[in-house]
Image (tube, helix red, strand yellow):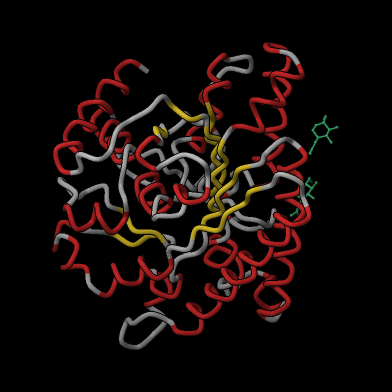
Amino acid sequence: MAIVQGLALAAALIFAAATTSLTYAASVVTYVFGDSLTEVGNNKYLQYSLARSDYPCMNIPAQVLLWLTSFLPNFWDFEAAKLGIQSPPPYLSLSKNDDALLDGVNYASGGAGILNDTGLYFIQRLSFDDQIDCFNKTKEVIKTKIGDAATNKHVNEALYFIGIGSNDYVNNFLQPFLADGQQYTHDEFLELLISTLDQQLIRLYQLGARKAVFHGLGPLGCIPSQRVKSKKGICLKRVNEWALEFNSRAQKLLNTLNQRLPSAKFLFADTYGDVLDLINNPTAYGESELVEFIDGAVIFARVPLILPELQAKFKIIELVSSVRARCKTT
Ligand SMILES: *[C@@H]1O[C@H](CO)[C@@H](O)[C@H](O)[C@H]1NC(C)=O
Ligand SMILES: *[C@@H]1O[C@H](CO)[C@@H](O)[C@H](O)[C@H]1NC(C)=O
């Protein structure tokens, strides 16, 4: 922890030079749910998983960077500048009664989806429902430590980041050899995804989540496994349209939940356009240093120094430093 914070501070100072208006406040407790874009190492603990993301500099950077695109600060009653989010550790790295559970946990698992059968061929992964079960267990442990009332306050005040859905397309619906793509039309499949997500977000709410960011899909038609299906290797228009449809439905769902569930502030983070811009104009963001586009997110990890333009565009704050810290320590 001390090492990570030290590195984080060092990196924060680097960024302070470029963006003097940013300051860094005490950490906000975050609980993170999702797939390979958000995983920080849970699958390493799943003996048989074929979806491993615990490689240096993978995964969390992109998602977190994109999460920060301008949505958080306006919505909640604190400013981005004061948002000292740290990247919490993987759930499976913690012991059952770890005090660290109180400081935030990352449940994300590569290959995971909204649907249980998504990512089937990775053998082991924590589906979104599994991840919510894990959070439920976390809450039980926290109760034994600080009591019911303080636990409820704790989970109400935490921030919840959710980035899930890409695999339901890439490693399910778009795979011709899996049942879902044959069984359902896209309209039916989308209906299934949204109704399942509805139940899952309600479960999170029942467990105490009030302030959550749901990260929409990127242009999935532009990821390599989809592009190869076109003769010229270009983005698949139909798949991108599906991603946009999903985003639009997910956004509507969040709005409905906000009206239905008292005190719920579920926010949709739409980064589709920014990611597409990045794909279409990579040179605008630092030329060859950029970028790999995986599973619907852009991996910035190999960019040695994030350009000021990029900082402005993506409002990169503290998270970049945790990426750096991870790259240095692994
Ligand atoms: C996934 O499986 C669990 C346990 O078997 C079940 O409770 C849950 O409803 C399932 N979720 C989906 C999305 O099918
Ligand atoms: C949390 O776990 C408890 C105990 O297993 C169970 O009764 C409850 O339904 C779970 N809550 C949610 C929202 O899944």
Q: Is residue 227 left or right of residue 304?
A: right
* Vertical comparison of 284 with 80: above or below: below
* Vertical comparison of 293 with 318: above or below: below
* Vertical comparison of 263 with 282: above or below: above
Question: Which of 92 and 137 lies nearest the eye of the viewer?
Answer: 137
Q: Residue furthest bottom?
A: 231
If the picture is divided into quarters, which one holds ligand 2? top right
Q: x, y (%) of residue 172?
A: 60, 65
Quarter-of-image position of residue 325: top left
Question: Which of 108 and 147 lies nearest the eye of the viewer?
Answer: 147
The quarter in which the C terminus is drawn is top left
Residue at the (37%, 28%) spot, across then down? 25
Q: x, y (%) of residue 162?
A: 56, 48
* Vertical comparison of 296 with 200: above or below: below
Quarter-of-image position of residue 1: top left
Q: Is residue 250 left or right of residue 315?
A: right
Question: Which of 97 and 224 lies nearest the eye of the viewer?
Answer: 97
Question: Which of 59 and 72 lies nearest the eye of the viewer?
Answer: 72
